[in-house]
Image: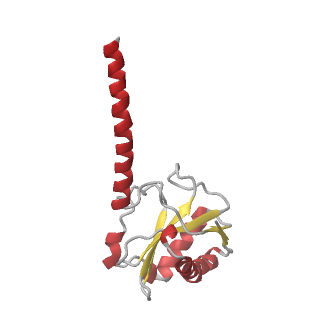
Amino acid sequence: MADRTRKYIIYILIAGILIPLICVAFYFFSFVFGFGAGTLGGFDSRMFPVSKNSLSKAFELLYKIHPEYKIHPEWEYLNDWKDRGYDFLDSRLIYFDKPPRELYYITFIGDANDCIQKDTSETSIAIRAVTNKVTGWTLEENCSSKEKRRIEKRFDDEIISRLEIYTESKAIVTD
């Protein structure tokens, strides 16, 4: 009986030490090597009163009419979202060549358990991260309020306004 009790005590001590160590290691490595799945926040969403299919076609038209918004080949290495574990998100990259040169990672907002957002009469998108190639990908939570306003204004003025024309609808900003 004493051997069995001693065994359980050893198991409890090992678990009490290993579990916190694993948690600390996980936190450390996710911080050092970039954000992991589930930690990708987002800027304010833009909800369009159209189907996802309509909004997807509007993005296609945007890239066709304004190919300057397609990712520049020199920046292609930054398109590593699948490697980061975000391949389940339906996303688009928007490249801005005029200063400040930036790349926006935008996703459709939907059911994360479903690879394709359900096709309803409303579809939302949001900027998830921004990079200027020097600083690496930056999340909304790491932007100053001034920088967030600048990014969202640029997004609204250059992208959302065009998507509204192509979808013949008005987007609504949501949190």
Foreground residue among 20 and 76: 20
Q: Which residue is drawn at 33% across and 33% down?
A: 14
In the image, residue 47 lies at what x, y percent? 64, 67
Say if residue 128 shows up in the picture: no
* Residue 67 left/right relative to 22: right
Image quarter where the N terminus lies is: top left
Q: Quadrant of the C terminus?
A: bottom right
Which residue is rendered at x = 61% and y = 77% of the image? 166
**Would residue 89 be visible to someone looking at this image?**
yes
Residue at image coords 31%, 70%: 77
- Display coloring: secondary structure
Looking at this rendering, what residue extends furthest in the bottom direction?
Answer: 99
Where is residue 140 shown, x and y percent of the image? 51, 69
Q: Is residue 22 above or below residue 60?
A: above
Query: Residue 156 appears at what percent x and percent y?
Result: 59, 79
Residue 134: name its quadrant.
Answer: bottom left
Q: Is 18 drawn above or below residue 120 in the view shown?
A: above
* Quarter holding residue 69: bottom left
> Viewer-proximal residue, 167 or 74?
74
* Nearer the observer, 49 or 150: 150
Instruction: Determine the residue positioned at 53% across, 65% down.
Output: 42
Query: Residue 121 location in percent, x, y?
Result: 68, 61
Count the marks: 0
Q: From the viewer's perspective, tell me whether residue 105 is left or right of residue 171.
A: left
Q: In this view, does 159 lie to the left or right of 97?
A: right
Residue 119 vs 69, above or below: the answer is above
